[in-house]
Image (cartoon, coloured by chain):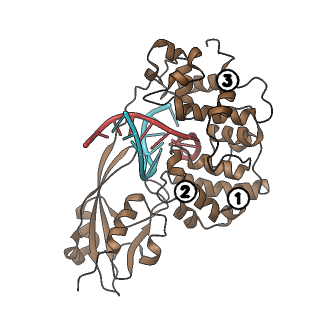
Chain colours: A brown, B cyan, C red
DNA sequence: CACCCGTGGCG
DNA sequence: TCGCCAAGGGT
């Protein structure tokens, strides 16, 4: 391991205080509940997206006790559209663990925090550093990029060995003897530097506080880092969605606890047209195909084929699920594309 | 440890 | 358009 620039931490702290971000809704507090909630929402999710969710969630669940006491469906409803729904389930379980096992107060060390559901090494470090000033490092996408550039780190960041090395580098770059709010400023500085200057495509090296100690900058091509070799493979799937509707309600079922859209509500899904027709029997003749919807997930490319089935008030489609009144349907935890389909469907009049 | 899990925005 | 990826963690 090369000698690490001791100037990194003090410079980062000074830069964050002078030029970092300070006005985000989850900043300016040391309340572990608020910090934790923001960190979970921000996992793999951009700040601009979270801004639309965080205040509403906090208003509905002002503290960890309120969240722990809430039905999971209420939590999913407020998470609806944010993606990675296991985060919401773990969030709920974590709140219940904090109440049941820690007297309603978050543990104060990264090591203890990391034992809670949905809190990994990086999130634990963020909470511990922001709220309790612990000398531990985060390692998220921003930090991976910043560190791999400062160090001209040649390892493939997708590989486990490289991750381990980056964690060691991150820990070695920490402030030697942090005082007061130093760890909070340092941790925020790592994120801010990656988000505002050391960006993926056009890093603003000219105004970067690390310009003279950045190995990638000196190499002439900072965007060559972080090194990634593995390419994403997306599998294609076609899903038939049974949109059984009557004037006052739509037929929905709760998705299984595992897999895509786990724990959310959605119309019954079929892997083939044959399966859909087999489930419906004679009713299949009344299906009305809608426009296909393309929906891509991280590792899956979905083509959703909505099949509308208008039914009279006293009928049922004969597949698992329940009638949900239109007034309630859009308030449920729904996957984003399903929400879109239902909004269109609600406004379509039934025949006759 | 390789794979799984959403969504929206941007170059 | 389309590939990339963002305050990752669970299994």
According to the image, label 2 marks what residue? Answer: A53
Number of the front mark, 1 or 2:
2
Q: Which mark is residue A121?
A: none
Residue A315, image x, y percentages: 33, 84
Q: Are marks 1 and 2 on the same chain?
A: yes
- Identify the residue at image location x=61%, y=27%: A167
Q: CA distance from mark 1 to mark 2?
A: 17 Å
Locate residue A104: give its quadrant: bottom right
Q: CA distance from mark 3 to mark 2?
A: 33 Å
Q: How many marks?
A: 3
Q: Is residue A139 visible?
A: no
Q: Are marks 3 and 2 in contact (CB under 8 Å)?
A: no
Q: Which one is earlier in the sequence, the residue at label 3 or at label 2?
A: 3
The N terminus of chain A, quarter of image: top right
The C terminus of chain A, quarter of image: bottom left
Label 3 element class: helix
Label 2 element class: loop
Q: Is residue A16 visible?
A: yes
In the displayed structure image, the side of residue A300 where residue A207 appears, left or right: right
According to the image, label 3 marks what residue? Answer: A11
Q: Up-down: is B1 above or below A310?
A: above
Q: Up-down: is A112 above or below A170?
A: below
Residue A225, image x, y percentages: 47, 22
Q: CA distance from mark 1 to mark 3?
A: 36 Å
According to the image, label 1 marks what residue? Answer: A64
Label 1 element class: helix
- Identify the residue at image location x=67%, y=23%: A11
**Which of the chains bears the disc numbered 3?**
A
Number of the front mark, 1 or 3:
3
**Which of the chains bears the disc numbered 2?**
A
């Amino acid at each position: 391991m090369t000698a690490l620039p001791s100037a990194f931490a003090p410079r980062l702290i000074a830069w964050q205080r002078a030029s970092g971000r300070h006005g985000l809704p989850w900043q300016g507090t040391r309340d572990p509940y608020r910090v934790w909630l923001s960190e979970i929402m921000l996992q793999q999710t951009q700040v601009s997206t979270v801004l639309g969710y965080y205040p509403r969630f906090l208003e509905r669940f002002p503290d960890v006790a309120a969240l722990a006491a809430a039905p999971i469906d209420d939590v999913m409803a407020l998470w609806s559209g944010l993606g990675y729904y296991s985060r919401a389930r773990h969030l709920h379980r974590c709140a219940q663990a904090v109440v049941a096992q820690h007297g309603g107060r978050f543990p104060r060390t990264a090591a203890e925090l990391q034992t809670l559901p949905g809190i990994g090494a990086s999130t634990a470090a963020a909470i511990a550093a922001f709220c309790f000033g612990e000398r531990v490092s985060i390692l998220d996408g921003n930090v991976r990029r910043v560190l791999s550039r400062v160090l001209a780190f040649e390892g493939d960041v997708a590989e486990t060995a490289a991750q381990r090395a980056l964690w060691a580098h991150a820990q070695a770059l920490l402030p030697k003897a942090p005082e007061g709010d130093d760890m909070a400023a340092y941790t925020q500085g790592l994120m801010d530097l990656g988000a505002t200057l050391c960006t993926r495509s056009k890093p603003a090296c000219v105004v970067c506080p690390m310009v003279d100690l950045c190995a990638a900058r000196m190499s002439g091509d900072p965007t060559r880092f972080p090194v990634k070799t593995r390419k994403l493979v997306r599998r294609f799937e076609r899903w038939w969605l049974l949109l059984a509707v009557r004037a006052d309600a739509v037929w929905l079922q709760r998705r299984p606890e595992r897999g895509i859209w786990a724990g959310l509500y959605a119309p019954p899904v079929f892997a083939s047209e044959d399966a859909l027709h087999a489930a419906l029997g004679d009713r299949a003749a009344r299906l009305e195909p809608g426009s296909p919807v393309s929906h891509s997930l991280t590792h899956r490319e979905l083509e959703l084929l909505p099949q509308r089935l208008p039914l009279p008030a006293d009928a049922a489609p004969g597949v698992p699920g329940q009638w949900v009144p239109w007034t309630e349907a859009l308030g449920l935890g729904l996957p984003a594309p399903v929400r879109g389909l239902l909004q269109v469907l609600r406004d379509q009049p039934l025949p006759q």
